Structures are given as structure tokens and as C-alpha cells.
Image (cartoon, rainbow, N blue to C red):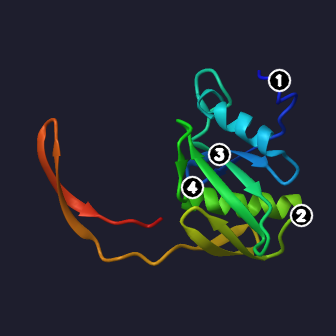
């Protein structure tokens, strides 16, 4: 463990089959956050770590309820994850940072959500129509459709 981190408090959430390590970044320094980011692959490892599909920070935001940073299990940062966004909203609610109606920012923009009982209703971005794509792979050309939902 590096010297920046003495102790890291986390929660484990699951949403529609995905599981996440949740970290409250409201009181962490930027150095602590960077140190945690460097450990994501080992912490998300199912065989030797906590085990998760990814790690999510909830962080302060000047105008919105919070900012969400989502990292895949390999440590790469992603624009958004719908199941992760719902878990982030619930986590922020449990921590007392938000009420039932929430607005937060992810890399791909601003999202709104509503907590209704035990359910989290998250408004995802509108998508463009699917685009037909053909890509070259080591096994030849593969065609299909591309749809970006954030």
C-alpha cells in the first residue's frame, strides 16, 4: 500500500448484475484519489482483490448534487455507466448528499435521477439512430450496428 493511503473506506453496490466499489470522495484529497485510481485493477480483481466490474467515486460539484467518476476494472476511465449511475445516486442518498431528485455530472454530461422507494429512475442520454459499421479484424471484416448510449 502506498504511503498516501492509510485506510480506504468503501462500499460495495450491485445494480442489475453489475457490481461496483463505491468511494465517497467528498473528503478525499486529490492525492488520495490519484492513489486509489492507481490501485483499481488490483482492487477490482475477483481472484485476489475486492472484486468488481468497476470503481465509482462520488465527488463534490459546484452546481449539481455531485460528480461521478467511473472506472472500469482495468483502471480505464469511462464516460458513463447506467447501472453505475443508479448505484452512485443510491450511495449519495445513503451518505446524505442528495434528496429524492438528483442531478449529477459524468464525463459524458449531466444526468438526472429520481429515487422512488427502493428504485432509482435514471434518465440516460438520447441516442442517435444506430449507425451501420464495418470493421476489419484479425478474422476478417465484421459488420454490425453502433449505438452510443453514453
Which residue was labeled with disc 4? 16
Residue 114, position as x, y percentages in the image: 71, 76
* Mark 4, secondary structure of its residue: loop
| Front disc: 4 or 3 | 3
| Front disc: 1 or 4 | 1
Establish if 145 lies above or below 13: below
Marks 1 and 4, the one that precedes in the sequence: 1
Report the Cα–Cα distance between label 2 and label 4.
Answer: 23 Å
Which residue was labeled with disc 3? 20
Looking at this rendering, what residue extends furthest in the front direction?
31
Report the Cα–Cα distance between label 1 and label 3.
Answer: 25 Å
* Mark 2, secondary structure of its residue: loop
In-front residue for pair 37/118: 37
Marks 3 and 2, the one that precedes in the sequence: 3
Which residue was labeled with disc 2? 96
**Label 4 neighbour load within 10 Å: few <14, some 14-19, many 20+:** few
Q: Quadrant of the N terminus?
A: top right
In-front residue for pair 127/105: 105
The quadrant in which residue 88 appears is bottom right
44 sits left or right of 134 in the view: right
**Label 3 neighbour load within 10 Å: few <14, some 14-19, many 20+:** many
Report the Cα–Cα distance between label 4 and label 3.
Answer: 11 Å
Q: Are marks 1 and 3 in contact (CB under 8 Å)?
A: no
**Label 2 neighbour load within 10 Å: few <14, some 14-19, many 20+:** few
Q: Are marks 3 and 2 in contact (CB under 8 Å)?
A: no
Which residue was labeled with disc 1? 3
Q: Residue at x 83, y 70 (%)?
A: 98
Q: Residue at x 63, y 21 (%)?
A: 48
Report the Cα–Cα distance between label 3 and label 2.
Answer: 19 Å
* Mark 3, secondary structure of its residue: strand
| Front disc: 1 or 2 | 1
Q: Residue at x 80, y 50 (%)?
A: 25
Amino acid at each position: 500500500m502506498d504511503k498516501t493511503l492509510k485506510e480506504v473506506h468503501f462500499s460495495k453496490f450491485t445494480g442489475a448484475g453489475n457490481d461496483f466499489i463505491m468511494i465517497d470522495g467528498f473528503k478525499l484529497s486529490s492525492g488520495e484519489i490519484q492513489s486509489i485510481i492507481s490501485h483499481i485493477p488490483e482492487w477490482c480483481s475477483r481472484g485476489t482483490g475486492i472484486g468488481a466490474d468497476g470503481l465509482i467515486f462520488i465527488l463534490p460539484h459546484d452546481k449539481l448534487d455531485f460528480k461521478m467518476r467511473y472506472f472500469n476494472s482495468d483502471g480505464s476511465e469511462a464516460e458513463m455507466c447506467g447501472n453505475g449511475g443508479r448505484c452512485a445516486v443510491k450511495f449519495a442518498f445513503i451518505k446524505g448528499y442528495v434528496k429524492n431528485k438528483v442531478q449529477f455530472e459524468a464525463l459524458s454530461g449531466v444526468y438526472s435521477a429520481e429515487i422512488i422507494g427502493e428504485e432509482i429512475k435514471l434518465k440516460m442520454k438520447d441516442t442517435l439512430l444506430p449507425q451501420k459499421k464495418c470493421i476489419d479484424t484479425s478474422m476478417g471484416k465484421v459488420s454490425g450496428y453502433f449505438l452510443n448510449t453514453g
